[in-house]
Image (tube, helix red, strand yellow):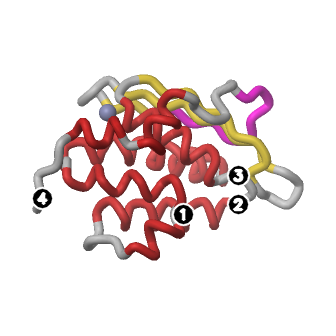
């Protein structure tokens, strides 16, 4: 395994942009689904809200993150990526993301298909930080599961 430098991640243009300009940062009122997640290991917090349209697709997302850059950038990317998806599609995307982070070395096509989220594959080089990239997704999955009732 190549031992990368964590600074490389913090200097990554895509990650830096999401960190500095988080998308969908406003807290959603009247959310259909809301979930909160905490990772005490590095003080990461994620707060997610979603509003669904009549077709059951994610129409609006609110995301507020605290803690490290990886956590905050992931939450921002996630908030963009799930818009317009049905809940099963959201779960499929989450599974794909987990596979990219924890499965075998992801092929380029997978990274391209994941868009901005693909830039987080670099975090694979830092096993203790993978949790930081997964917190937003596990929080999202908790919310979707609870939303089903
Ligand atoms: Zn973290």
| Above or below: residue 30 compared with residue 88 | above
* Range shown magenta: 28-36
Q: Mark 4 sits on what residue?
A: 2
Q: Would you name the residue on which mark 1 appears?
A: 93
Q: Are marks 1 and 3 in contact (CB under 8 Å)?
A: no
Quarter of the rendering occupied by the N terminus: bottom left
- In the image, which is nearer the foreground, mark 2 or mark 4? 4
Q: Is residue 148 rendered to the left or right of residue 64?
A: right
Q: CA distance from mark 2 to mark 1?
A: 9 Å
Closer to the eye: label 4 or 3:
4
Q: Residue at x 33, y 59 (%)?
A: 101
Secondary structure state at the residue bearing disc 1 = helix
**Residue drawn where x is 31% and y is 42% of the image:** 9
Estimate the spatial distance between the alpha carbons at disc 4 and disc 1, rounded to whole Å: 27 Å
Work out whether 1 lies above or below 52: below
Contact, CB < 8 Å: mark 2 with mark 1?
A: yes
Of label 2 and label 4, which has the lower sequence position?
Answer: 4
Spatial separation of the CA atoms under disc 2 and disc 4: 35 Å
How many numbered marks does the figure carry?
4
- 10 Å neighbourhood of mark 4: few (<14), some, or many (≥20)? few
Identify the residue position indicated by label 3 in the image. 83
Residue sitting at x 89%, y 55%: 54
User: Percent position (x, y) of residue 24?
Assistant: 67, 34
Cβ of mark 1 under 8 Å from ligand 1: the answer is no
Q: Label 2 to label 3, Cα distance in Å?
A: 6 Å
Judge whether residue 4 is colored magenta.
Answer: no
For numbered disc 3, what is the local secondary structure? Answer: loop
């Amino acid at each position: 395994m190549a031992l990368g430098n964590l600074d490389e991640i913090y200097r990554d243009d895509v990650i830096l942009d999401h960190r500095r300009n988080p998308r969908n940062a406003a807290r959603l009122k009247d959310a259909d689904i809301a979930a909160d997640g905490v990772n005490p290991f590095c003080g990461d917090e994620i707060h997610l809200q979603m509003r669904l349209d009549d077709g059951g697709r994610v129409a609006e997302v609110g995301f507020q993150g605290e803690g490290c850059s990886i956590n905050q950038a992931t939450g921002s990317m996630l908030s963009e990526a799930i818009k317009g998806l049905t809940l099963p599609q959201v779960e499929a995307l989450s599974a794909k993301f987990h596979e990219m982070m924890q499965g075998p070395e992801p092929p380029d096509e997978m990274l391209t298909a994941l868009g901005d989220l693909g830039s987080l594959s670099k975090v694979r080089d830092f096993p203790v930080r993978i949790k930081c990239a997964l917190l937003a997704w596990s929080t999202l999955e908790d919310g979707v599961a609870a939303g089903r009732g």
